[in-house]
Image: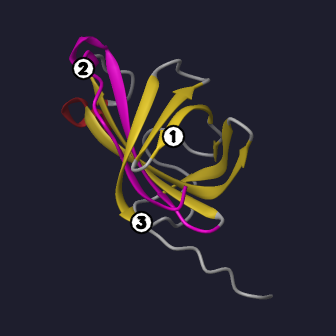
Amino acid sequence: MQGVWEEEPLPYRDSLLQYTSHQFKFTCDSFYVVLQTRAKANYYADSCFKNGTWMEYAKGTYVVNHDTLYLFGTFTKANYKQKLHDCYRIGQYLPTFLIKNKSAGKIELQSLQQHLPVTLKLKEEIVCNPLPL
């Protein structure tokens, strides 16, 4: 899992009212994610809607158990520092994905919350070198 992964766009994403793409960075035990959302309907204050395109960020730890990827994190600011208030989501970021297929340079996930497929393509490998405590 270690590496920088970018989501390949869904072919029908333009027909959705709202679509969020993911860019993950998995290190030895942590993850960092950039969530880019495009929306046709405004559910936020006008100052937050930003013409229907905005970014969110989260970081935390992850566990792969059998065929499931569990992410345990919190929403953050762009610098990955704690976010207590602002536009969009705050608090915990706890998605769960089924790992449908994994091959060299590609992972196919199924989000259990949104029921949309997430296909990630490896952009950069990260070698995990655990250090003793």
Q: Is residue 16 magenta?
A: yes
Q: Residue at x 53, y 21 (%)?
A: 114
Find numbered disc 3 in the image and state the secondary structure of the residue it sits on.
Answer: strand
Q: Does residue 20 lie above or below 7 as drawn?
A: above
Three-letter code, disc 1: Lys
Q: Amino acid at mark 2?
A: Pro
Q: Looking at the image, which residue is at 45% across and 24% down? A: 117
Q: Position of residue 56 (x, y in %)?
A: 41, 47
Q: Quadrant of the C terminus?
A: bottom right
Sequence-first disc among 2 and 1: 2
Q: Residues within 10 Å of mark 2 (few under 14, many from 20)?
A: few
Q: CA distance from mark 2 to mark 3?
A: 26 Å
Residue 102 image label: 1
Q: Which SS class for mark 1?
A: strand
Q: Across the whole image, how many numbered discs are drawn on residues? A: 3
Q: CA distance from mark 3 to mark 1?
A: 15 Å
Q: Describe residue 8's horizontal placement relative to residue 25 as left or right.
A: left
Q: Kindly report the distance in space between the C-alpha atoms of the residues bearing marks 2 and 1.
A: 20 Å
Q: Which numbered disc covers residue 11? A: 2
The one of 40 and 5 positioned closer to us in this rendering: 5
Mark 1: few/some/many CA within 10 Å (<14, 14-19, 20+): few
Pick whichever, 66 or 37, lies toward us. 66
